[in-house]
Image (cartoon, helix red, strand yellow):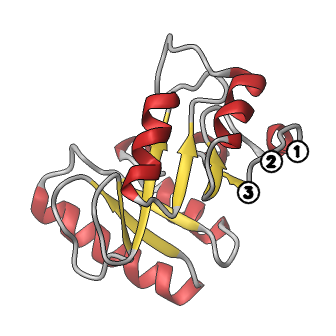
Amino acid sequence: MTDERMGEALWEAVRRLPRGAGIVFRHHATPLAERRQLFARLLRLARARGLVLVRAGDLPMRGEMGVHRGRSRSLVTWPVHNAGEARLARQAGADVVFVSPVFGTRSHPGARGLGVRRAEALARTLPMVRIALGGMNARRFRTLHRFDGWAAIDAWLR
């Protein structure tokens, strides 16, 4: 998951991702022309490294490999914070879901995490690829069951 807080650290974070990993491009506050340039640069790097790049938000980006919370002929990812959103993800035919926040996170100050039990219960209802998000890192991921992978912002900045 990207956002403006990453700054130039974005490039090192992307270089650290394992081949086959994915990036959800979320630079919502970046002016459109700059956002398109940033996406194009990130797309070149993603292709060279064998990464998947999907776009969040309403504005299509040239070369996008999928869409986060939207309709697409290609990959569809979806946020799931509760049972209602799990139902929406299934109805949308999402290929990948991000169950979050599993733990407390800096990007949502004051918001309580789902906790392991509730996150795993939500994941159990989802027949697609399930990614744990929110306060995640490799150590925390190893404590979870029912998830296919994990995503983060801050964990990649360290």
- Tell me the crowding category of disc 3: few under 14, some 14 to 19, or many 20 or more residues within 10 angstroms, Cα based: some
Numbered disc in front, either 1 or 3:
3
Front in this rendered view, residue 49 or 123: 123
Front in this rendered view, residue 93 or 96: 93
Three-letter amino acid code at disc 3?
Asp
Front in this rendered view, residue 67 or 13: 67
Q: Residue at x 13, y 52 (%)?
A: 31
Label 1 sits on residue: 142
Q: Earlier in the sequence, mark 1 or mark 3?
A: 1
Three-letter amino acid code at disc 1?
Arg
Numbered disc in front, either 1 or 2:
1
Tag 3's secondary structure?
A: loop
Front in this rendered view, residue 141 or 69: 69
Where is residue 92 drawn, in percent x and y? Answer: 37, 55
Q: Residue at x 37, y 71 (%)?
A: 66
Three-letter amino acid code at disc 2?
Ala
Where is residue 102 drawn, in percent x and y? Answer: 65, 30
Label 3 sits on residue: 148
Q: Earlier in the sequence, mark 2 or mark 3?
A: 2
Q: CA distance from mark 1 to mark 3?
A: 11 Å
Numbered disc in front, either 2 or 3:
3
Label 2 sits on residue: 138
Tag 2's secondary structure?
A: helix
| Up/down of 107 relative to 72, above or below | above
Q: CA distance from mark 1 to mark 2?
A: 6 Å
